[in-house]
């Protein structure tokens, strides 16, 4: 199999995997239902999948450094899929929780730290999604790389958002934070060199 | 007067034929999304014997229908929702965990220790605790601190009448309650998410209020395990976490008792925990709530709509301190 064909296959598999949770949710909604509180189920599922896919996007660069160059295009694929779930997550909150009232959104963003963090993460992701095309990458040149460093504060804010909203059981957000911490640590120059040394 | 006759096999353990035939469907509902979509859920999809089918629970007979002041005419939450969407951290922290783990709890035989500032302390079997009282229906709104709500037809007995039988002394100013501790029956207790046992408490005048009941059933049948079988508190004007489940100890005392959530996060949960749309939880608003079964949120009522009946208990107190 030539490299281009392999890349296409990997890409298709990633898109299918990323869309599967949405398909499962839609299937459940049409058959067994989404439980007693469907709005909460949808909010939690879209939020968690946004986080998982953004972490997956963040894992691509270190994996590439380890020699898995075939995965390289998936950084954008996972990033955009994560952004799609984050958008659904935000819209569910805006429409079904806040009843589309701008006043309530301002109040929530201003007064609830977990909403502030989540909203800020979403705002930071918007320009990244908009400029994710090859055309924008070419046009922005070196500035594109600098702009996309915003992915780091965005993921930190998203992790804080999760950590700040649970009531007592911190285990799950802590696991996500640990994974996020490790992925961010691979960006430290010393870790980067070490990864390159481990090339498969 | 009627006797409470516990079944020889706890009814929650009996799987009816209809439930058995629907087992895959129930599994799909119970574990469904969690198992398919969330990673931790993948390990939680064991078959459950907990009742999500009312017919598996013993019907309670001779229940006095709720008089108007103890019933809301609002649409009742479907039994299936009320028995599958539960906060009972002793059975797991996800809303779907309690129904999956409920089969481990053995609600029979059951006894309760009543102690402290009472003339007649002691351990009493559940049947004997209930024997002198007529079972009453109460249809109450239940407002969770997480901003969702239900309407549930409970079956129980007035807490005040039960306490009076033990002859509280003049020093009894508060009532403290404790949930069973047994990690085999309540597997959520294997992790120290809260400092077990779960503890709750009321001021004496709150406990004596006719709205406060000890519930043994709902929807005309005994309580499903995941809803706090066999004996739980229901105080409808307070956030749901005050309504402690699977009670094994009731202590009357002079000092205000420690309560689990205010110990765990004193800045977020107080002793009173009265439903108040004007006092936000530090992390989210309490102004509105999602009634289970509805898509949009609705305004939350002062004292969960029971202000007329219990408002006088809090005269002169700072509502900001009543969270």
Image (cartoon, coloured by chain):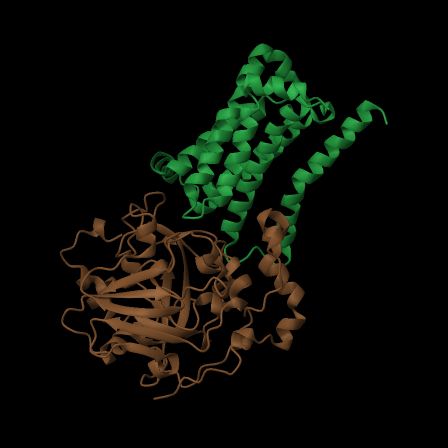
Q: Eyeballing the image, is A82 above or below A64?
A: below
Rendered image quadrant of residue A79: top right
Q: Which of A119/A99 is in front?
A: A119
Q: Quadrant of residue B254?
A: bottom left
Q: Which chain is brown?
A: B
Above or below for B295 versus A60: below
Give the quadrant of the N terminus of chain B.
Answer: bottom left
User: In percent of the image, x 34 and y 50: which residue is there?
Assistant: B264
Q: Residue at x 44, y 39 (%)?
A: A163
Chain drawn green, letter? A
| Residue at (47, 63) in percent of width and height | B186
Residue B105: percent from the left, percent from the top? 49, 69
Q: Position of residue B136 (x, y in %)?
A: 35, 79
Instruction: For residue A98, say whether it is visible.
Output: yes
Q: Position of residue A195 (x, y in %)?
A: 64, 22
When the figure is inspected, residue B215 is found, relative to residue A173, above or below; the finding is below
Seen from this angle, which residue lies furthest bottom? B1
Position of B153 with respect to A143 (left or right) is left
Residue A25 vs A90, above or below: the answer is below
Relative to A69, is B136 on the left or the right?
left
Residue located 48% across and 69% down the image: B225
Q: Quadrant of residue A87?
A: top right
Looking at the rendered structure, the number of numbered marks drawn on it comes to 0
Q: Viewer-proximal residue, B36 or B118? A: B118
Image coordinates for residue B293, horizontal then vertical, percent: 48, 59
């Amino acid at each position: 199999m030539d490299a281009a064909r392999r890349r296409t296959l990997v890409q298709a598999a990633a898109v299918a995997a990323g869309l599967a949770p949405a398909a499962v949710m839609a299937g459940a909604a049409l058959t067994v239902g989404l439980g007693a509180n469907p709005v909460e189920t949808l909010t939690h599922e879209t939020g968690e999948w946004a986080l998982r896919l953004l972490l997956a996007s963040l894992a691509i660069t270190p994996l590439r450094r380890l020699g898995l160059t075939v995965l390289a295009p998936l950084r954008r694929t996972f990033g955009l899929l994560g952004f799609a779930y984050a958008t659904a997550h935000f819209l569910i909150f805006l429409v079904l929780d806040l009843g589309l009232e701008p006043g309530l959104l301002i109040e929530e963003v201003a007064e609830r730290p977990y909403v502030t963090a989540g909203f800020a993460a979403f705002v930071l992701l918007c320009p990244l999604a908009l400029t994710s095309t090859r055309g924008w990458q070419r046009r922005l040149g070196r500035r594109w790389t600098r702009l996309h460093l915003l992915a780091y504060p965005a993921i930190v804010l998203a992790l804080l958002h999760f950590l700040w909203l649970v009531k007592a059981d911190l285990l799950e957000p802590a696991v996500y934070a640990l994974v996020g911490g490790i992925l961010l640590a691979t960006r430290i120059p010393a870790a980067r060199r070490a990864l390159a040394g481990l090339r498969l | 007067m009627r006797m409470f006759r516990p079944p020889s096999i706890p009814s929650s353990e009996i799987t009816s034929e209809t439930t058995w035939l629907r087992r895959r469907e129930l599994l799909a509902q119970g574990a469904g999304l969690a198992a398919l979509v969330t990673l931790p859920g993948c390990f939680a999809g064991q078959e459950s014997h907990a009742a999500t089918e009312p017919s598996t629970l013993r019907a309670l007979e001779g229940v006095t229908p709720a008089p108007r002041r103890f019933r809301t005419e609002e649409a009742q939450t479907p039994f299936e929702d009320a028995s599958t969407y539960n906060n009972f951290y002793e059975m797991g922290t996800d809303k779907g965990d309690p129904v999956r783990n409920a089969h481990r709890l053995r609600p029979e035989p059951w006894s309760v220790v009543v102690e402290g500032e009472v003339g007649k302390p002691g351990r009493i079997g559940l049947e004997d605790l209930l024997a002198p009282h007529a079972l009453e229906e109460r249809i109450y709104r239940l407002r969770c601190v997480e901003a969702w709500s239900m309407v549930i037809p409970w079956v129980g007995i007035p807490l005040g009448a039960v306490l009076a039988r033990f002859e509280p002394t003049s020093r009894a100013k508060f009532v403290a309650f404790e949930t069973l501790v047994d990690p085999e029956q309540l597997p959520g207790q294997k992790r120290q998410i809260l400092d077990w046992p779960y503890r709750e408490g009321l001021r004496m005048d709150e406990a004596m209020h006719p709205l406060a009941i000890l519930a043994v059933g709902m929807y005309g049948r005994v309580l499903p395990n995941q809803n706090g079988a066999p004996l739980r508190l229901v105080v409808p004007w307070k956030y749901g976490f005050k309504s402690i489940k699977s009670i094994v100890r009731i202590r009357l005392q002079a000092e205000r008792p420690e309560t689990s959530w205010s110990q765990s996060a004193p800045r977020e949960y107080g002793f009173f925990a009265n439903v108040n749309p004007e006092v936000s939880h530090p992390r989210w608003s309490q102004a509105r709530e999602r009634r289970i079964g509805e898509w949009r949120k609705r305004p939350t009522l002062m004292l969960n709509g029971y202000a007329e009946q219990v408002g006088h208990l809090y005269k002169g107190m700072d509502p900001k301190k009543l969270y």
